[in-house]
Image (cartoon, rainbow, N blue to C red):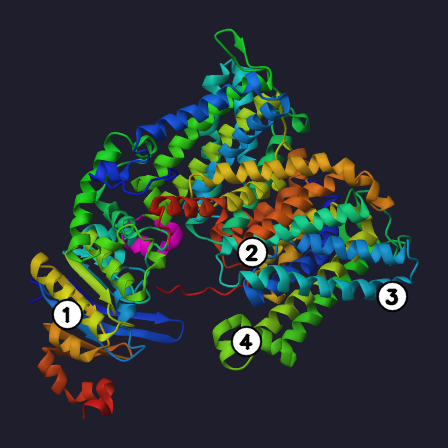
Amino acid sequence: MAVLRPAGEFDQSYAYDMATMRRRWQWLALAGFLALLYALPAYGSPSLVSFVNRAAMIIIAVQGLNILTGYTGQISLGQAAFMITGGYIAVLLVTRLDWNFFLALPVAAIGAGLVGLFFGLPSLRVKGFYLAMSTLAAQFIIPWFLRNAFPEVLNGAQGLNAPPPELFGVVFNQPGRFLYISLTVLIVTTVVAHNIGRSRLGRAFVAIRDQDLAAELLGINPFKYKLQAFFLAAVYAGLSGALFAFHLRHVNSETFSLNDSVILLGMLIAGGLGASVGPILGAVLIQGILELATMAGPAVSPFLPSAAAGAVQALRPLFFGVVLMVFLIFEPRGLAHRWSLIKAAWRLRPFSH
Amino acid sequence: MAESALLSVEDVSLVFGRVQALSAVSLQVRPGEILAIIGPNGAGKTSLLNCISNFYKPTAGRILFDGNDLTRTAPHRIAGFGIARTFQNIALYTGLSTLDNLMAARHIHMRAGLLQCLLYWGFSHREDLRHRLVVEEIIKFLEMEAIRKTTVGALPHGLRKRVELGRALALEPRLLLLDEPMTGMNQEEKEDMARFILDIHEQRGLSIVLIEHDMGLVMDIADRVVVLDFGVKIAEGAPDEIKRNPEVIRAYLGQAYT
Amino acid sequence: MNWQLLPQFAVTGLLAGGPIALMALGLVLIFKSSYIFNFAQGQMMLIGTLVTWWLAVPMELPLWLAIILALLLSALLGLAIERLALRPLTGQPLLTIILMTLAVGQTLQGLALLLFGGAQRNFPQIFSAADPYRIVTPFIHNERNITIILKQNLVWSFVVAILLVVLIALFFQFTRTGLAMRAASEDHELAQGIGLRISRIFGISWAMAGVVATIGGILLATASGLDLSLSIVVLAAFPAALLGGLDSIPGVIVGGLLIGLTQGVASASSVQIVRSAAEIMPYVVLLIVLLIRPEGLFGRKRVERI
């Protein structure tokens, strides 16, 4: 539960105990925060608007990974491939079949989900490293397919161009407008992810993560729930990828790569596995660091060896790698864990020891 | 006798490579009894439980529960027949609270599907509330109110064993398989656990299969005892008979009891 | 299928399987001792090869000396990664460890780019590029025997790679250290119980993996030049290691050769889409292996306990 609880507040019923938000001020605070976000184009700088827009779309992909890896414990190195899949499906539905973007979006997500389901099939027989390898296979086979199959439809390595989304005459053709779509989808995915976490489904996922054998012997069908997790993770990836395709107005087989799959996992770790705020904290932090690295690149290039002058992209993998290593060694439970410590201290205030 | 058995293990053998873990073991669990299975380390006790869970596939023989052949049932369906168990080395869902461990065990009694869970409000929420009542009853019964919201990974050994018992009870089984529920406990904790087991047996009338090393406790609790040695059943009977059985004394109890 | 090209492509593919087997060996060495699958193997290879290049070309050291120094450095790099990045994670869940090797890979990739830049460079020739070997096969196409043309560097890279794998297999079979490493791979606690120092064994296997990676990188670079994409080449070796069984040293030879062969055969197809599939063949093979025989061809099946 991502909410601060003051001392002296107790549960009066099981429903109250289980509720996420217990007080009206909590709802008001949330509504106020969201209103600030939605109004961002009115007062934020263009680069901030554009950052929030990107971050929102990335968070969705990380939330999907959190369902699969954070809750269910299945390691996936293929999340970026399912993002591309969602992007392609959405663009094809809009450009080939003249669908409205807002109809194509959920369909593309489900399409990506089904592809994810297929690549989750090896989880029937393998786990751990072996499963990571089979998701790695998705990361190679899917872009290859998009690059080489049906060139008259998929347009080979060139990829596809997308028109801006349109609804009731409003054209979402700049970050300031696209932000509304990204944020709205993000709110829906956050609520759904939160629901998964607290329901029968989420408990089955975590049971499989923590003790797959015991879970199986106590009545949870591991294969069924692993596949559902793969499906949901890829649905989220598909949503994120479709949004990106229409934000960038383009998608090709290299829009997202193995590197992106790794970065998404890194965001999840930095944010905190299996916590519903984890993806939000992790994606914002890591994306911020990556964009900082890109900006810092030109500043450091005069100090680089001559052979490397111009290699300003070097800082991105370097920063990311180092930050991830620091998290893995010193705070493997991520920022969400810090957050929960703060909450616990608040709950017991003023007697926190 | 065969008709009245709840669980009937018939000539079960289990081979790992060149190791014969079980050789043609047969035994029966009658409705409402506590059957203890004892034997030295490596006698095949846990292997036998794992065969009942169909986690290990027996090389020969069959295991009938209520007319269903468990060796032909997918492991995750066996709990649905009414068999629950605990594990020798504690296999709790360490990242979940005590409450959620028990709620997760209600899985087989719950119906919310994928979509209902994604939406949560309505069916899934009401279902959670209903099952919460069942779970709270078990929490009260096992005196676990104080650790309801504690992540079980942070609990001490003795309490984890108790949570695991609670999780098995939350499945509302007809047959409970307890794999060394008291190992690693001090005397007081053992007595608490023994009391819980007897209370469960009395109040819920379920059949219990108990694997345990503490002979004194086993002899006090069990209605009948089966003795395994090197995968072979060497004796079966009331606790008093087992205590006097010379073969059991030689194989298991050793000098300590002679 | 283009029958005329098939023998040529099949043999070339098999030979390319040598370096793949060597790269897979690096993965297996680490997995065998510590159950860690090292996703940074490609970047270790990249750094080692770039250092060799740097010593041999801008520093103008003799090539043999450059290689020896680079191999020493690679061993140290392997040791350092084990000690600084993975040792602190002992007992952590699998995901943490996988991510650590990925993070190490990203860091090394960034360092390589920062220190050496992304330019394509020529690597010193070790084996002659001239005078390719010609082999006349008994297969007849259009009334002529099919001739296979093999570049010398391809053949000798293959020979060196396979020899090295065999050498390390012998090391595991017949030396005390090798025996200790095998014992450790059976059961960490048991090995410690009989007085083996697990930490030393982990260190040795990471150092060996570093050396093996750099040799593989040098073999590849001398044949086809050197740039940052060298770290990607290892991706073909992941499936080879898995196919062989992840903990089997002879398995990597079979895995490497099979992967090379399937890539070669796919390239000989007359259908364009199959030809283009040569690049993903390792992963198609991988998926099939995972579904049919997840423990690989030579791996051991482990009994799960609860």
Which of C106 and C4 lies nearest the eye of the viewer? C106
Q: Give me the residue at 37% from left, 51% from top.
A: A352
Image mark 4: chain: C
Q: Position of residue C178 (x, y in %)?
A: 63, 76
Residue A329 disc label: 2
Q: Give me the residue at 77% from left, 37% from top.
A: A299
> Residue flagged by tag 4: what amino acid is it?
Ala
Label 2, label 1: how far apart the Cα atoms are:
48 Å
Residue that carries the numbered disc 3 in the rendered image: C65
Q: Is residue A101 visible to the viewer in this orientation of the structure?
A: yes
Q: Position of residue C268 (x, y in %)?
A: 70, 42
Q: Give me the residue at 59% from left, 74% from top.
A: C181
> Residue flagged by tag 3: what amino acid is it?
Leu
Mark 4 touching mark 3, by CB under 8 A? no
At label 2, counting other C-alpha atoms closer than 10 Å, the crowd grade (few under 14, some 14-19, many 20 or more) is some
Q: Quadrant of the N terminus of chain A?
A: top left
Residue range of the region highlighted in magenta in the rendering? A207-220
Q: Give me the residue at 85% from left, 45% from top.
A: A307
Tag 1, which secondary structure? strand
Which of A264 and A335 lies nearest the eye of the viewer? A335
> Residue flagged by tag 1: what amino acid is it?
Leu
Task: Give the label, 2 or 1, closer to the camera.
Answer: 2
At label 4, counting other C-alpha atoms closer than 10 Å, the crowd grade (few under 14, some 14-19, many 20 or more) is some
Q: Is residue C136 visible to the viewer in this orientation of the structure?
A: no
Q: In the image, are marks 2 and 1 on the same chain?
A: no
Residue C183 disc label: 4
Mark 2 touching mark 4, by CB under 8 A? no
Tag 4, which secondary structure? helix
Image mark 3: chain: C
